[in-house]
Amino acid sequence: MKIISWNLLRLIGAAVEDVALLVQEYQPDLLLLQEATKEMEHLPNLVGGHFYRDPLPRRIHGLAAWSPRHLHPPKTIHLPKSPVPMNIPRIAQLVRLGDVTFANVHLSHGQVRNRLQLTYIARALDGPAAVIGDYNAWGPTVLHGFRDVGPREATHVQRNLLHFRLDRCLVRGLTCASARALKKGKSDHRPIMLELAVA
């Protein structure tokens, strides 16, 4: 399975036409998006397929999944909140493709909080699974029973100066034949693309 994940940078980043070009060039089996606005709901009009978007509570953006194949409606789980006032509530979008569950994530910025959110997500997953998206994590991410198979290069550029590896993929019961970061286009994140198979 070819999987692509991309944080779009909501209103000022990649537009639906940019996402359509990515789909046409790489032909993924599953595309996972973060910071997807309502505009992204037009993606099937450009490339066909099946699309689901789950907005974050009280936000104009959220998580979205597209596939050329039929997708069952994803399950949405609410993640542990940060005690910090004004912190964005976070969700995970659980997408089933064949025998594999993919958790599409855009985790909190707090380095303790996003690790707790990962543990919470792992408890909701059965069988072969991947947790993929914008982790907002610095340093290693360790999750019992999972391996980090995402690209090792930086995927996010902050203010055109600082480079971070924020977009990641942890898997359980899957093998990874390849993983790489693609050109970032209009977003401040590079899409990541992985070739995964059930072990």
Image: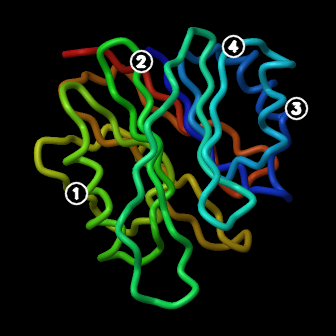
Instruction: Say whether residue 101 is left or right of residue 55.
Output: left
Which quadrant would residue 194 be assigned to in this image?
top left
The span from disc 3 to disc 4 (Cα, nearest Å) is 15 Å
According to the image, label 2 marks what residue? 97
**Which tag, 3 or 4, sits closer to the chain's start?**
3
The span from disc 2 to disc 3 (Cα, nearest Å) is 25 Å
Is residue 118 depicted above or below 159 in this figure? above
Disc on res. 49? 4
Please tell me which residue is depicted at 72% across the width and 74% down the height of the picture.
Answer: 159
Instruction: Say whether residue 59 is left or right of residue 90.
Output: right
Q: Residues within 10 Å of mark 3 (few under 14, many from 20)?
A: some
Q: Residue furthest left?
A: 145
Please tell me which residue is depicted at 58% across the width and 85% down the height of the picture.
Answer: 86
Which quarter of the rendering shows the C terminus? top left
Instruction: Say whether residue 174 is left or right of residue 188.
Output: left
Which quarter of the rendering shows the N terminus? top left
The span from disc 4 to disc 2 (Cα, nearest Å) is 14 Å
According to the image, label 3 marks what residue? 17
Q: Amino acid at mark 1?
A: Thr
Is residue 183 depicted above or below 101 in this figure? below
Q: Indicate the position of residue 96 as horizontal and vertical percent values.
A: 40, 23
- Disc 1 element: helix
Contact flag, marks 4 and 2 (Cβ < 8 Å):
no
According to the image, label 1 marks what residue? 119
**Which tag, 1 or 4, sits closer to the chain's start?**
4
